Image (spheres, rainbow, N blue to C red):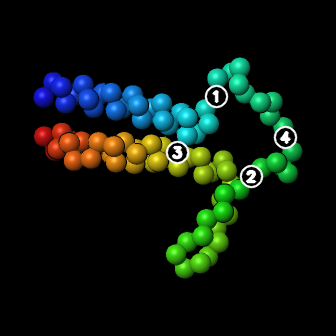
Amino acid sequence: MKSMKNILVFFMILVLFTFFNECGVKSNSEKQPTSTSKSQSTTRTIIDMDGNTINIPEKVSKAGCTIGAINQMVLMLGDPYWNVLKK
């Protein structure tokens, strides 16, 4: 059981790094100067199953990085993760 906890901690740390990389969190030295012009705001286009097109501003869609990181953690760990949570 102790080794299972170590594996879980390892994957949690891995997911944190994945989260920061996915969401574009950069150190101060890598940050680009921010501009106030709205012409540079980007949108993400999503086409749902009915063929409708949805445009989401990039700032809103970055909130989904947390969901993506959690989903990736669950996919990586698979069944052992849920067995530990059930106990």
- Name the foreground residue: 4 vs 28: 4
* Residue 29 as seen in the image, left or right of residue 51: right
Kind of residue at disc 3: Cys
Residues at discs 1 and 4 in contact (Cβ within 8 Å):
no
The residue identified by callout 1 is 26
Residue drawn where x is 52% and y is 75% of the image = 49
Residues at marks 4 and 3, CA–CA distance in whole angstroms: 24 Å
Residue drawn where x is 22% and y is 28% of the image = 5
**Residue at disc 3, secondary structure:** helix
Residues at discs 3 and 1 in contact (Cβ within 8 Å):
no
Kind of residue at disc 1: Lys
Q: Which mark is residue 36?
A: 4
The 10 Å Cα crowd at callout 4, few under 14, some 14 to 19, many 20 or more, is few
**Residue at disc 4, secondary structure:** loop
Q: Position of residue 30 (x, y in %)?
A: 71, 25
Residue drawn where x is 40% and y is 45% of the image = 72
Kind of residue at disc 2: Thr
* Residue 2 as seen in the image, left or right of residue 13: left
Residues at marks 1 and 2, CA–CA distance in whole angstroms: 18 Å
Kind of residue at disc 4: Thr
Q: Position of residue 6 (x, y in %)?
A: 24, 25
The residue identified by callout 2 is 42
Say whether disc 1 or disc 2 marks the residue closer to the N-terminus.
Answer: 1
Which image quarter: residue 20?
top right
Say whether disc 4 or disc 3 marks the residue closer to the N-terminus.
Answer: 4
Up/down of 51 relative to 4, above or below: below
The residue identified by callout 3 is 65
Say whether disc 2 or disc 3 marks the residue closer to the N-terminus.
Answer: 2
